[in-house]
Image (cartoon, rainbow, N blue to C red):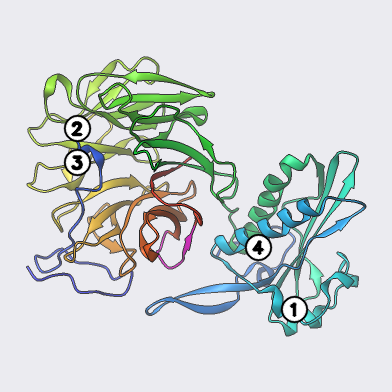
Amino acid sequence: MRPLAPTPRHRRLRRSASALIGLCLALTPLYASAQDAPPSGDTATEGDLSGIEVEVSGSARRTLLPVAVPDTQALAGADGAIADQVEQTLRRNLDLAGYFRVLPVDSFFFDTHNEGLAAADINFPNWMNVGAQGLVKSSVRAEGDQIALDLRLFSVDQGRQISLNWSASTLSPDDVRKEVNAFINAVIEHYTGQPGFFGSRIAYSQRTRSGAKHIYVMNIDGSGVQRITRNNAINLLPSFGPGGSIYFTSYQDQNPDLWVWRGGSVSKLSSRSGQNSGAAFCGGKLAVTLSLGGDNTDVYLISPEDGSVVQRLTDHWAIDVSPTWSPDCSRIAFVSGRSGGAHIYVMNADGTEQRRLTFQGTYNTTPEWSPRGDRIVFSGRDERNHYDIFTVDMQGNIERLTQDQGNNFEPSYSPDGRYLVFTSDRGGQGKRLWLMSADGLFQKLLTEEGSSYEEAAWER
């Protein structure tokens, strides 16, 4: 079989011996160690994301709307640090959203502080001359120990304020970032018909200098980082359960046991000899990978309450690992070595009708089902031993989302299926978390500081 030559993203790969995708078994520790309608009241032209086309990679292009975000006004004795937080959150997260090109502040050739927040007080021709189509104005005002937050979106072309599914409010300083993100979600909803993802969370693992590996949770914009594990062991494979709980595997007691974090405390859920890993929760059911009695790994259902075995779903001489649920909880995708290499398989939730889904490459791993139910994303290794991210539909058709950008692996879908968070070592600064649109066209660095980030899981 000839190697897979570099190609533009989204080239659909046909099933043939000549189309080789080397997909990575080594990525999973289990193997290594064992535009829509606008809001009502707005016209269709207002809801269009009609910006400029920018080249993202190769021949791929994505339309971005030029948006200006001037400094946040600090009124009536408001803390300047809060104003800074508002404008920085607006600029970074609008850029991170993947629909906007936030214009540089040094391109504003006039004094933006002379303008107010009302349309009558804004010189729209000036904003048009700097290339803005959208304009976000903001202010904070001190009201006792509270903050009055005012955020507004304007159409520069039309010279008027746009009505959003959001309203100004008075709130605690600790809640300012959350409310700014709610505004950004409303801006995204205006232009795309669906609200943004800000306010959602991801869990991930990160290795320390001492060699330990801990589980963390943070908001998708990188704020609110919270450490979940407090031992000095290897902790990995986090996944979300009901009520914001987090399942993870820990070597704290010298065995890969399954633990769960609930309401600020951790407890052991499954500690059978061998693997207790890869937990996936859906509709009251918990699928895991176990190696009971020293056998090779298989997929089981266990009780989310006490960890008792409910049902064995796979029973094969080869390894079966990494279960992931379809959004309706009716099917499970998993990785199996029964065909001679690691491939993606699917089965019913009761273990019946197991079938192979991927027929290209030799190592396909870390699958996750799209919230829309039409595709499964997974990690891969190409003929040059580079790891990349692919998707496969229910007919076995594969698309490549990353290429020629370092190693990329462990993807996880956003709640609405429009984005992916994944690990990449591009840039030579170690493993960091990146955000990517589900079509692969837009990719942005998420964790700007530190390295050794892995195994991100998006809460949904």
Give the residue type at disc 3: Ala
Give the residue type at disc 2: Thr
Residue 32's tag is 3
Read off the residue under disc 4: 91
Residue 108's tag is 1
Q: What is the spatial separation of the Cα atoms under label 1 and label 3, in whole angstroms?
A: 53 Å
Q: What is the spatial separation of the Cα atoms under label 4 and label 3, in whole angstroms?
A: 41 Å
| Residues tagged 1 and 3 counted as in contact (Cβ below 8 A) | no
Q: Residue 334 occupies which quadrant of the picture? A: top left
Residue 354 in percent (x, y) is at 17, 38
Read off the residue under disc 2: 352
- Residue in front for this viewpoint, 131 or 167: 131
- Residue in front for this viewpoint, 198 or 111: 111
From the image, give the main secondary structure of the stretch colored magenta: loop
Element type at mark 1: loop
Q: Which contiguous range is marked in magenta?
A: 438-445
Nearer the observer, disc 4 or disc 3?
3
Q: What is the spatial separation of the Cα atoms under label 4 and label 1, in whole angstroms?
A: 15 Å
Q: What is the spatial separation of the Cα atoms under label 4 and label 2, in whole angstroms?
A: 49 Å
- Earlier in the chain: of badge 4 and badge 2, it is 4
- Earlier in the chain: of badge 2 and badge 3, it is 3
Density class for disc 2 (Cα within 10 Å; few <14, some 14-19, many ≥20) is: few
- Dividing the image into 4 quarters, which one contains the N terminus? bottom left
Nearer the observer, disc 2 or disc 1?
1
Give the residue type at disc 4: Arg
Residue 183 in percent (x, y) is at 70, 53
Q: What residue appears at the point 31 percent right and 75 percent down from the top-left corner?
A: 8
Residue 358 in percent (x, y) is at 19, 53
- Earlier in the chain: of badge 4 and badge 1, it is 4
